[in-house]
Amino acid sequence: NQICLTPHFWVLLHKFHQDKIQKMKEVSSNRELLSSRLGFILVAAGCAIGIGNVWKFPYITGMSGGGIFVLIYFIFLLLLGIPILCMELGVGRASRLSPIKAFKSLEPEGTKWHLQGWVSLIGCYLLMMFYTTVAGWMLHYIFSTAKGTFAGEMPSGYVGEQFNSLLNDPATMCMWMVIVVMLGCITVGYGLIKGLERISKTLMLILLAIMVVLAINSVSLNNGRAGLEFYLVPNLDRMRQVGIFNVIYNAMSHAFFTLSIGIGSMAIFGSYMKKTNTILKEGITIALLDTAVALVAGLIIFPACFAYKIEPNAGPGLLFVTLPEVFNRMPWGQFWGAMFFIFMSFASLSTVFAVFENIITCCSEQFGWTRKRSAFYNFFIISVLSVPCVLGFSEWTWNWLKIFGGTILDFEDFIVSYCALPLGGMVFCIFCTSRYGWGIKGFYEEANTGDGAQFKPWMRGYLTYILPLIVLAVFVLGICDKFGMI
């Protein structure tokens, strides 16, 4: 205690802190950047574009009244999603570091904002613990559809039985999960430009091309027009049937979740951005591409459902149970079904690669590992962490383990989607606007550097006081909805 009270101790402590800051500046000054704006847009959008866009968005739209939900979703995307996306990108670009180091380099001395960096890393691991399993389902469905599992006359409930059979086959699910983890580690471990950027650009361009082909085929089906009207034309009567509160809440929460904001998965790509364009310009571009993919997914699904008299409000089973039946009734259905699940796989893998980049870069900067060593270690770490989710469905493994009444996947999704994402988003928001954090002045200066749309002074009140309350509402209402309190 006497040593800690001496002036010499505080001088040494301050010097130690300054040395750490200097080392972080050296790392950030040598930061590798993405080679082109197109590369940045496609890689960052690939992180946002995932199963949430092509699976969750269509089924929530179907359950929430169609066109009226889409309209309200657009409003909340503008008010909620884009500002926090820009804050994550801003933290990354200003620091040129991964989330753990980024907060440390920007926070006022003596504060603890850097703890959010560790929470972000943990959130990324939690996401991969179940996302790799779901991405594995997509790969499995490509082969199942291509080999004719869902072709020909199928008895009632056959498709659902096939999906349940997959859930009760942990060996098959584990195989696909390991393949997903391996693809992620190889892609990211190979390098930022030669690995992640090159493969993500190719993946995204093929994904967009497949989407256009599938959408054209779907909207040209006989009787598909009714599906387009349901999807694109707002109808207040359907909104009243579903419940006005339910529609608004679903739109608000999905506008937040769709961009993968809150766990630093976008901050890492901000650290690879050039300062040619403003943060707001790039944020809007990413959000528009992300939304376009979600909209085209609906153009693929809803006309097909109405053309073959399948109810669009099938919920989470719309993708794995309902759609195989739809494709089976189409001419060339085996081909279109395989193409659709290739599209789904590419969408899910783009998110896997992006989150892997965050994990591997955080580990490299924190522990001094090379990129390849970090990828190698994390292959085993994430594979092992993903096993409980794989085993959580089978009747002869851990199916008996119910947490909050759901499976292990449901619990892991709850921690990420209902807790880590909204709370992390609120921390980013407060950090970027509070004088006790980075501050609105620092954020504005970074965000408005470059050409393009800028944050205006009149937006300050909204960003500082109203936006955090909206994010808090997403968190509270999500918890209440999860436990049946609303």
Image (tube, rainbow, N blue to C red):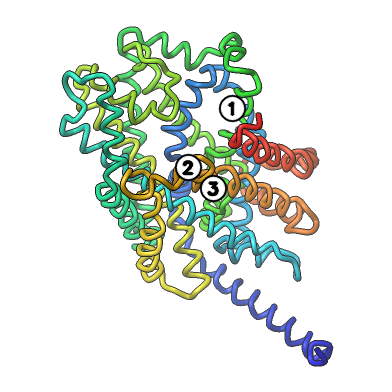
The residue closer to the viewer here, 119 or 189, is 119
- In the rendered image, residue 80, in percent from the top left (x then y), is placed at 65, 37
Specify the label residue 476 is tagged with: none
**Residue 486, quarter of the rendered image:** top right
Q: Residues within 10 Å of mark 3 (few under 14, many from 20)?
A: many
Query: Residue tagged by mark 1?
Result: 74
Query: Mark 1, mark 3: which one is toward the viewer?
Result: 3
Q: Residue at x 77, y 45 (%)?
A: 464
- In the rendered image, residue 98, in percent from the top left (x then y), is placed at 55, 62
Query: Residue tagged by mark 3?
Result: 416
Q: Marks 1/3: CA distance? A: 23 Å
Amino acid on which disc 3 is placed: Val
Q: Residue at x 42, y 48 (%)?
A: 130
Q: Marks 3/2: CA distance? A: 10 Å
**Residue 322, above or below 478:** above
Query: Mark 2, mark 1: which one is toward the viewer?
Result: 2
Q: Secondary structure at mark 3?
A: helix
Amino acid on which disc 2 is placed: Asp
Left or right: residue 467 compared with residue 259: right
Left or right: residue 444 compared with residue 217: right
Query: Residue tagged by mark 2?
Result: 410
Q: Residue at x 56, y 54 (%)?
A: 264
